[in-house]
Amino acid sequence: MERKKKVLIIDDEVDFTKMVKLNLEETGKYEVKAENSGSQGVAAAKAFRPDVILLDIIMPDMEGSEVASHLRGDKDLKDIPIIFVTAALTREENITQGGVIGGHAFLAKPVGLDELISCIEGHTSK
């Protein structure tokens, strides 16, 4: 049996993280941890060692770009793929930007489960 992929969600919207965690875990393919603040997310990444991180950009305590910078600066975490999941950008911007911002993949909210899984699989299939 395949090992479940570990997904860390860092997003200040509690309802969003609960829904994504529930939906991903229901597939049976993922072990999901959710944090609702950037600083807790960085600590969770160190402890949880996820295969991929879903990261919001606009959060009250620490911007997503700052969280990504902390992760990239840590030798043990720097290679974990980060996918920004944000309402700050539209689907149209996602298309025009080729789904990449600052070297990281991104998805525009609201994001469908199939789209999310496809993106996770595309960044963890090493």
Image: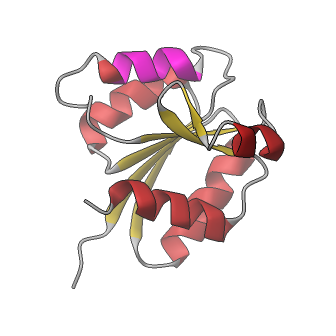
Q: Image point 41% across, 16% down: which residue?
A: 69
Location of residue 42 (image quadrant): top left
The image shows residue 98, relative to residue 76, as above or below, that is below
Task: Please give the name of the residue rendered at 63% of the width and 71% of the height, measured from the top-left corner.
Answer: 114
Name the residue nearer the viewer: 41 or 87. Answer: 87
- Residue farthest along the left direction in this orientation: 75
Q: Is residue 63 magenta?
A: no
Left or right: 46, with 52 as reference point? left
**Magenta part of the protein: which range?**
64-71
Which residue is more in the foreground, 33 or 121? 121
Residue 18, percent from left and from top: 64, 54
User: With 72 as the anchor, is 69 left or right in this view?
Assistant: right
Left or right: where 85 falls relative to 119: right
- Vertical relation: 105 (above or below) 39: below
Q: Is residue 82 visible?
A: yes
Q: Position of 6 compared to 24: left or right? A: left
Residue found at the very far bottom of the displayed protein: 1
Relative to the observer, which residue lies in front, 27 or 22?
A: 27
Q: What residue sits 64% from the left and 64% below the top? A: 115
Q: Quadrant of the N terminus?
A: bottom left
The residue that appears at 54% across and 76% down in the rendered structure is 26
Residue 48 screen position, x and y as percent: 29, 44
In the image, residue 22 lies at what x, y percent? 59, 66
Can you give x and y, in whole percent of width and height, for residue 75 in the image?
A: 17, 23
Residue 60 in which image quadrant: top right
Q: Is residue 108 visible?
A: no
Q: Quadrant of the C terminus?
A: bottom left
